[in-house]
Image (spheres, rainbow, N blue to C red):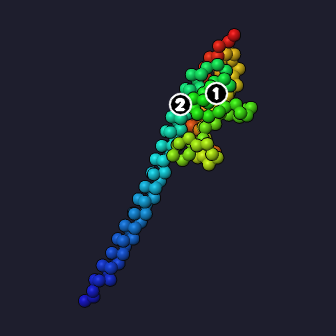
Amino acid sequence: MRSRAPLALMEQMVMILVFALAAALCLQAFVKSDEMSRRGEARDQAVLLCQTAAETIRAQGGSPEEALAAAAGALGTVYGAYDGAPLELHYSEDWSPCEDRTYTYCLQAEPVDTDVPGLAKVSVRLEESGSELFAIEVAWQEVLS
């Protein structure tokens, strides 16, 4: 009578292979879900910062340029150093404001031309390495003299 040892060994090797494949698939799914979670967290933070900047700009009132200049101080930066340049705020990877050029996230706000007299509008957007995470436009009524 022949021994069943080679068959048992083959079954165990097949089971190890199945478990290794399942572990690899699970690991890949966990990595993908972690990436999606980080992206969602970044988008949530981008929405919060854009809304804060938009409401700060809108609260200043006046022309878009005046509102951006006044809001820049409240947001912790300077606006108007270069004509036509947008208001920019830079953030590091952990979302803390940074002044150097090694930033990860960039919030920009710039005036938008409208054809309606007395309507002021500013576009606020946040980018990560050139890719837009979130954008919002804020509008208010200017005081006409």
Callout 2: few (<14), some (14-19), or many (20+) C-alpha neighbours within 10 Å? few
Residue 128 is at least partly visible in this image: no
Q: Position of residue 11 (x, y in %)?
A: 33, 75
Q: Based on the displayed image, in which of its 4 quarters is residue 62 positioned?
A: top right
> As displayed, is residue 49 above or below residue 7?
above
How many numbered marks are there?
Answer: 2
Front residue of this view, candidates 99 and 25? 99
Q: Position of residue 108 (x, y in %)?
A: 63, 36
On the rendered structure, is 28 left or right of 114? left
Callout 1: few (<14), some (14-19), or many (20+) C-alpha neighbours within 10 Å? many
Three-letter amino acid code at the position of disc 2: Thr
Where is mark 2, residue-wise? 52
> As displayed, is residue 14 above or below residue 57?
below
Could you say whether the residue bearing mark 1 is in a helix, strand or loop? helix
On the rendered structure, is 82 left or right of 92? right
Judged from this view, the residue extending furthest toward the right is 83
Judged from this view, the residue extending furthest toward the left is 1
- The circle on residue 31 is none
Residue drawn at x 57%, y 29% as measured from the top left: 74
Where is mark 1, residue-wise? 68
Q: Position of residue 73 (x, y in %)?
A: 60, 29
User: How many angstroms separate mark 1 from mark 2 (CA)?
Assistant: 13 Å
On the rendered structure, is 5 left or right of 87? left
Residue 99 is at least partly visible in this image: yes
Q: Position of residue 67 (x, y in %)?
A: 63, 24
**Which part of the image, by quadrant, shows the N terminus?**
bottom left
